[in-house]
Image (tube, rainbow, N blue to C red):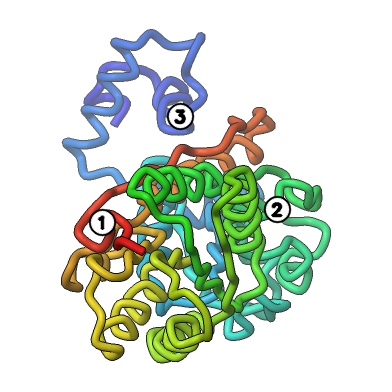
Amino acid sequence: MARAAGVSQATVSLVLGGKWRGRVSERTAGLVRDAASELGYRPNLAARNLRLGRTRTALLVVPALTNEFFARVYGGAAEVAAEHGFGVVLYPSPEGTGPARDPFPSARAALDGVIASSMAAGTLDAIRGTDLPLVMLDSDPADRASAAQVNLDVADGMRQVVDHLLALGHRRFVHLASAVPSWTFAVRARALEEALGAVAEAELRTVPSPLDVPGALAAAGRALGAPGPRPTALVCDDDILAAGACKAVRRMGLRVPEDVSVTGFDDLALATAVEPELTTVRLPAERIGRAGMTALLDVLSSRAPASGALPVTLVPRGSTGPAPAA
């Protein structure tokens, strides 16, 4: 390869080892890379990893694979990892948001770091011990056990939902709240309560629901059939809950949105598969996956990870409309 590029073997080693900057010109580095490509060179990753003490592998832990959101997070993380010669292993924890088991005989020997989405840092102790760097996604920023955090501005997303519904004249709300114990759902609930608490005539009732369509169907049915004035808006923690809520509205002989408006959260593919399509909050799942992997690479390179919450966007669709006349 040195002969093909017209350089010394030492120069080839510097370029292929990624240590050429400041020691070899950009033009010379390009000649070496071109020669490597033409000769079909492939680095011996096992030897390099042994030399560097790195496996170039990250573990992405998620509470479930049934939610499309986490698959998209993985896609974003894997994209950035591939750009830097890393791999990402996806681990859907059988314990959900509870303490996760180590999927390897010893994760600390098989991995360079852990990324976890929508879980508490303490639930990862069996996997990471005290050695592996941890990046938390969509998790409590007060939890200092992680080396870096990447969050979505879900509170602002819920405020956008409230502003949208208030502008349509709604004042009687039911919060169809996920029963999953998670920081992200707690933040959504708190933001909803605070936003409506500032409106004197607004009424809010919270009804917990399992995070599935049958559970949401039953919970929304109870909310709509409760004594007293019927709510005009069902604010759901998730698009899956919103789909169940829409079914409950129709089963009671009511219409969405003419009689009851329904909102979701996440903007899953499901949001446009139902009729009417869901007004929801779009969470940039791929972007948080990319940001999480970038943060882990920063930590491994002793760089300061970026800070700040990623913005989310309200997507108004057909499931919301003006509040019905009293």
Tell me residue 240's x, y (percent): 38, 75
Q: Dot 3: few (<14), some (14–19), or many (≥20) neighbours within 10 Å?
A: some
In this picture, residue 45 sits left or right of residue 250 = right
The answer to whether residue 149 is above or below residue 253 is: above
Of labels 1 and 2, earlier in sequence is 2
Tell me residue 320's x, y (percent): 28, 58
Quarter of the picture containing the C terminus is: bottom left
Query: Which callout, 3 or 1, points to the residue nearer the camera?
Result: 1
Residue sitting nearer the eye, 48 or 297:
297
| Residues at discs 1 and 2 in contact (Cβ within 8 Å) | no
Q: Could you tell me the amino acid type at mark 2?
A: Asp
The answer to whether residue 164 is above or below residue 112 is: above
Query: Which callout, 1 or 2, points to the residue nearer the camera?
Result: 1
Q: Residue at x 80, y 48 (%)?
A: 144
The answer to whether residue 92 is above or below residue 166 is: below
Mark 2 = which residue? Answer: 140
Q: Residue at x 29, y 84 (%)?
A: 247
Q: Which mark is residue 82?
A: none
Q: Secondary structure at mark 2?
A: loop
Of labels 3 and 1, earlier in sequence is 3
Tell me residue 193's x, y (percent): 63, 55
Query: Which callout, 3 or 2, points to the residue nearer the camera?
Result: 2
Tell me residue 237's x, y (percent): 49, 66
Q: Which mark is residue 321?
A: 1
Q: Residue at x 43, y 43 (%)?
A: 163
The answer to whether residue 263 is above or below residue 222 is: above
Q: Could you tell me the amino acid type at mark 1?
A: Gly
Q: Secondary structure at mark 1?
A: loop
Q: CA distance from mark 3 to mark 1?
A: 65 Å
Q: Dot 1: few (<14), some (14–19), or many (≥20) neighbours within 10 Å?
A: many
